[in-house]
Amino acid sequence: DAGVTQSPTHLIKTRGQQVTLRCSPKSGHDTVSWYQQALGQGPQFIFQYYEEEERQRGNFPDRFSGHQFPNYSSELNVNALLLGDSALYLCASSLDRGPYNEQFFGPGTRLTVL
Amino acid sequence: GESVGLHLPTLSVQEGDNSIINCAYSNSASDYFIWYKQESGKGPQFIIDIRSNMDKRQGQRVTVLLNKTVKHLSLQIAATQPGDSAVYFCAETRNSGGYQKVTFGTGTKLQVIP
């Protein structure tokens, strides 16, 4: 059973460009959350998708958007990239069963903005 | 504001000794706490969790202690092994609009000396 997978593993972009990151959740999971992890910091919650809708959002600007597909996979889009967007982007999946749902993380996508 | 932080950014421990990693949280509404281990190049991996109605929970070689009076969480690792070397994050979860809101701390790097 494959766990959470993310693509690409590494990505280099320049300021002002747009990027799309992809995530496939663990088999059987229906909820996908995205996090941004700056070097030496803990992950910061971006948003969460469930049933193809964004149902929670952290303190991130509208440049960060996402999508969830019927097969529960998800994309994170970032427009007008800034140098400060350089980070490891983590996807976590879970099964919505109640108030406490264990999240399983993927290996992340390392984004470098030059 | 709300925050989850750690007292020690780096902890060096001799192999075979016990490790204690501490975490302070500020949001008294948090009702679920999780410890994650993150190895280089990987996403965070669930270690152990504890609900706010408990003060201690044990797993295999790990114990989590929760002191709600002083808003303090600790992770104890018994007989630390080289494979335990990683960055450890505590995360707090609280109900926000009917969903889990997860906030990570900044992490503690555990170095195991052979």
Image (cartoon, rainbow, N blue to C red):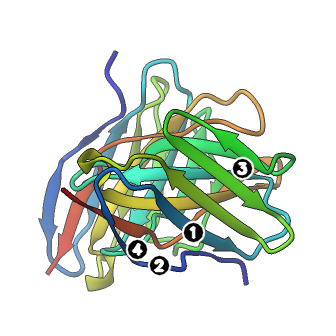
Residue at the spot of label 1? B22
Q: Quadrant of the C terminus of chain A?
A: bottom left
Q: Are marks 1 and 4 in contact (CB under 8 Å)?
A: no
Residue at the spot of label 4? A41
Circle 4 — which element?
loop
Which kind of residue does numbered mark 1 sit on?
Asn
Q: Nearer the viewer, mark 1 or mark 3?
A: 1
Residue at the spot of label 3? B100
Q: In which quadrant of the rendered view does residue A3 lie?
A: top left
Q: Are marks 4 and 3 in contact (CB under 8 Å)?
A: no
Q: Quadrant of the N terminus of chain A?
A: top left
Chain of the residue displaying label 4 = A
Which kind of residue does numbered mark 3 sit on?
Gln
Chain of the residue displaying label 1 = B
Q: Nearer the viewer, mark 1 or mark 4?
A: 1
Q: Are marks 2 and 3 in contact (CB under 8 Å)?
A: no
Q: Position of residue B48 (x, y in %)?
A: 57, 42
Q: In which quadrant of the rendered view does residue A81 lie?
A: bottom left
Chain of the residue displaying label 3 = B
In this rendering, position of residue A3 left or right of residue B57? left
Q: Earlier in the sequence, mark 1 or mark 3?
A: 1
Q: Position of residue B27 (x, y in %)?
A: 78, 72
Circle 1 — which element?
strand
Q: CA distance from mark 2 to mark 4?
A: 13 Å
Q: Position of residue A23 (x, y in %)?
A: 35, 40
Q: CA distance from mark 1 to mark 2?
A: 7 Å
